[in-house]
Amino acid sequence: MELPYASCYCEENIYKACKALHSDLKTASPDYLLFVVFISSPTRAVPLFCQRSSRRQDGLVIWDYHVVLVKVFNDKTHVLDFDTTIHADNVQLNVHDGLRRVDFIQFDEYAELTFRHSWSLPESFRRRFRVISAQDYLSSFASDRSHMLVLDESGQNVYVKAPPPWPPICGPIACTAGVLMNIDSFIGMVDDDGNKLNDQHGLEAYGMRFGEVLTEEQFSSPGDMHNIGYHE
């Protein structure tokens, strides 16, 4: 399938994928569950393998955060990652007209090749997973893309990467609350004491939802996702 894509804007790519797939999947079967997953670490340095932008043979990239889509249907779980090289021979990695051809990958295969659980990681690099129902993400996410701005030599704000061709995203609940930027509420996983963060900026009082934070062990057992609050 072909979906909207912009390099280095994974949170927006997944938002667009959610919007395109959510209603179709629920129409196909009400038993489908669709989750958005933010992957990060306490220091916002998260190692992922089999990543398209890597120059290494193993595809290792240290992201500050990454976002994927997880589809659950009965006992079958699949992952959609715009930036993976898994099954690259079956996926056109080129982008044309702002679209990328992607497909879902079986969860166990994706997790084994992307996370390499056998690696022993220091605490600062240990991955955390914020899991949000697709509908909550569509309603609550907002980004004015200011996190992609840096100052150039003349002191002007410039984008690290060119922004997507579509307008900045603001979910209906976020817009009603006047919130134009809340990506940190999705990326943040733990506080300074290592405790899981859920509503770190008090935005749930406005009706926004940010899912739940899982450890890698919890996330690697897809059955645990059935216990995540799911809102239509």
Image (cartoon, grey):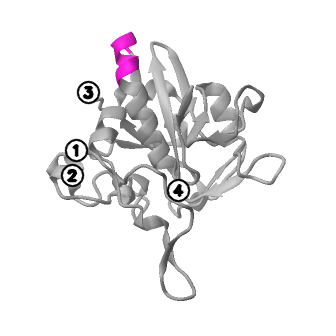
**Quarter of the picture holding the C terminus:** top left
Judged by depth in the image, the label closer to the viewer, 1 or 4, is 1
Rendered residue at 49%/87% (across/down): 155
Relative to 147, 174 lies left or right: left
The Cα–Cα distance between marks 3 and 1, rounded to whole angstroms, is 14 Å
**Disc 3 or 1, which lies upstream in sequence?**
1
Q: Main secondary structure of the magenta part?
A: helix
Asked if disc 1 and disc 2 are in contact, CB closer than 8 Å, the reply is yes
Q: Which residue is mark 4?
A: 41
Q: Image height check: is 223 above or below 228?
A: above
Task: Estimate the x, y position of residue 151 in percent, counting from the top left.
Answer: 51, 81
Q: Which residue is mark 2?
A: 175
Per the rendering, the mark at residue 172 is 1
Rendered residue at 38%/33% (across/down): 19
> Counting other residues with Cα less than 10 Å from the Cα at mark 1, is it few (<14), some (14-19), or many (20 or more)?
some
Q: Secondary structure at mark 4?
A: loop
Asked if disc 3 and disc 1 are in contact, CB closer than 8 Å, the reply is no
Identity of the residue furthest to the bottom in this view? 154
**Quarter of the picture holding the N terminus:** top right
Asked if disc 2 and disc 3 are in contact, CB closer than 8 Å, the reply is no
Q: Secondary structure at mark 3?
A: loop
Q: Amino acid at mark 4?
A: Ser
Q: Magenta includes 133?
A: no
Relative to 114, 75 lies left or right: left
Q: Which residue is mark 3?
A: 232
The Cα–Cα distance between marks 1 and 2, rounded to whole angstroms, is 5 Å
Q: Which residues are magenta?
A: 23-31
